Image (cartoon, helix red, strand yellow):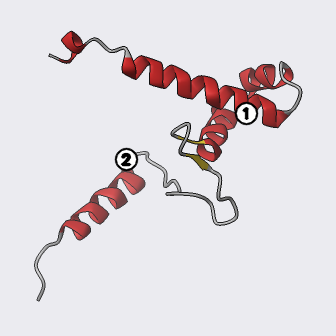
Amino acid sequence: MAGPSEHAFETAICESLLSAGGYTRVKVGNAADRDDDFSAELGLDTAELFAFIGATQAEEWEKVRRSHSTPDEAQRAFAQRLAKAVSYTHLTLPTSDLV
C-alpha cells in the first residue's frame, strides 16, 4: 500500500477549492486550437485576460473597443499597456518596501 503523496495532497486541495471554495477551473497553457493564447513577450494569457474582461467589464471594454479601428487592435493595445504597467510597477518597487 502506497503512502500519501504530494500529488494526491495537491489534488485534494484543488478539488476542495473548486467544490466549496468558490474557485473555477482554468485552462493551463494554450487552448488546443490556439497556439498564441499566451504571449511570452507580454507575460499574459490574452485569451484568459479578455474572457475575464468580457465577463466582468463589458460596458467599459466596449468604450475601449470603440476607440480603436478593430477589435484586434483594441486587444493588442490594451495587452501591451497592461504588460507595461505591470512591468513598470514591478521594476520600480523600492527595496525599502520589501523589508
- Residue drawn at (60%, 38%) of the image: 49
Count of marks placed on residues: 2
- Please indicate whether residue 50 sits to the left or right of residue 15 in the image: right
Residue that mark 2 sits on: 21
- Identify the secondary structure beneath mark 1: helix
- Front-most of residues 16 and 56: 56
- Residue drawn at (62%, 60%) of the image: 31
Residue 6 location, quadrant: bottom left
- Please indicate whether residue 32 sits to the left or right of residue 68 in the image: left
Residue that mark 1 sits on: 75
- Please indicate whether residue 56 sits to the left or right of residue 9 in the image: right
Tag 2: amino acid: Gly
- Residue drawn at (22%, 12%) of the image: 97
- Please indicate whether residue 46 sits to the left or right of residue 1 in the image: right
Find the distance from the CA under tag 1 to the CA under tag 2: 31 Å
Tag 1: amino acid: Gln
- Identify the secondary structure beneath mark 2: loop
Residue 70: where, in percent of width, then height? 87, 32
- Residue drawn at (66%, 42%) of the image: 51
Residue 85: where, in percent of width, then height? 52, 20
- On the rendered image, what quadrant is the N terminus found in? bottom left
Among all residues in the image, which is located at the extreme front? 41
Local packing at callout 2 (Cα closer than 10 Å; few below 14, some 14-19, many 20+) is few
Circles 1 and 2, Cβ within 8 Å, touching? The answer is no
Among all residues in the image, which is located at the extreme bottom? 1
Measured along the vertical axis of the image, is residue 61 above or below residue 42? above
